[in-house]
Amino acid sequence: MLQNIAIYPNERDVFYREEADNCYSTETFILQYTTLELPFEIVSSFIFGVFAALVCDLERTGKMFLICAFNCFCIINCGESVGIMFCTLFSHAGFSVNITSVLLSISTIMGGIMSLNLNSFLQGLNHLSPINYSIANLAPYSMKHQTFTCTAAERLANGQCPIDTGEQVLQLYNLDTNAPMNVMALGVCTIIYRLVAYMLLKAIRSHGTMEKIRAIGERLNRSKN
């Protein structure tokens, strides 16, 4: 989101002027913007993968490194797409930041760690969030082979620890899910987010749309006056 706010508004304004002069199309703009952002997202994701899989010792394997890097890439890319959507709808960057931050905060809370018992409506909305799929695949991959110990004071009456294995943690948080399927769902979600951002930008810049929006705004202003 922050990377998008720093770059996209200026690029958007340049695109609006050049598109009005028929220099290039919406497809050209979204393709070049995506192409330029991808290398930075990939590098950032690999750095995150090193710290998450190797330094934090979720599971020091090449597979875990790639999974962490892929999840980071998808989340960053989805954040960029959300930023494109709101910066396209609202010209004020500060307002777009506030709206995007609220949505990302809600998605993080509903992801599956902090809020475990969502009602059916919120659970349905949660399926639209890439964070939901990210947690649903990272948790099984990182926890299934983990074991835990406890002190004598922490043991239960039967002498066992409250949590002995990673599988028990997954069952406690309802995260014992199909990890490969959620990895695929996260990738699909990332592509859909960028397509939605493109379609929204295309709709806003289509012939007559901006004029209609301005006309509605002018009518609202006249009605207030």
Image (cartoon, rainbow, N blue to C red):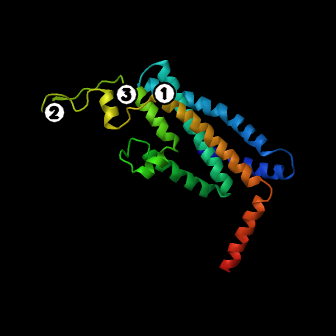
**Residue 215, quarter of picture:** bottom right
Q: SS for tag 2? A: loop
Q: How many marks?
A: 3
Task: Identify the mark at residue 180; answer none if there is no mark.
Answer: 1
Identify the residue shown where x is 64% and y is 50%: 85
State how far apart marks 3 and 2 are (Cα).
22 Å
Identify the residue shown where x is 30% and y is 30%: 168
Q: Earlier in the sequence, mark 3 or mark 2?
A: 3
Query: What crowding class fits label 3: few (fewer than 14 Cα within 10 Å), some (14-19), or many (20 or more)?
Result: some
| Residue at the extreme top | 61
Please name the residue that numbered disc 3 is placed on: 143
Residue 139 percent location from the top left of the image: 41, 32
Please name the residue that numbered disc 2 is placed on: 156
Q: Kindly indicate whether the residue at mark 2 contacts the one at mark 3 (C-beta within 8 angstroms).
A: no
Residue 79 percent location from the top left of the image: 58, 43
Q: Is residue 132 above or below residue 220?
A: above
Residue 157 percent location from the top left of the image: 12, 33
State how far apart marks 3 and 1 are (Cα).
14 Å
The amino acid type, in three-letter code, at marker 1 is: Pro
Q: Earlier in the sequence, mark 3 or mark 1?
A: 3
Q: Is residue 108 left or right of residue 7?
A: left
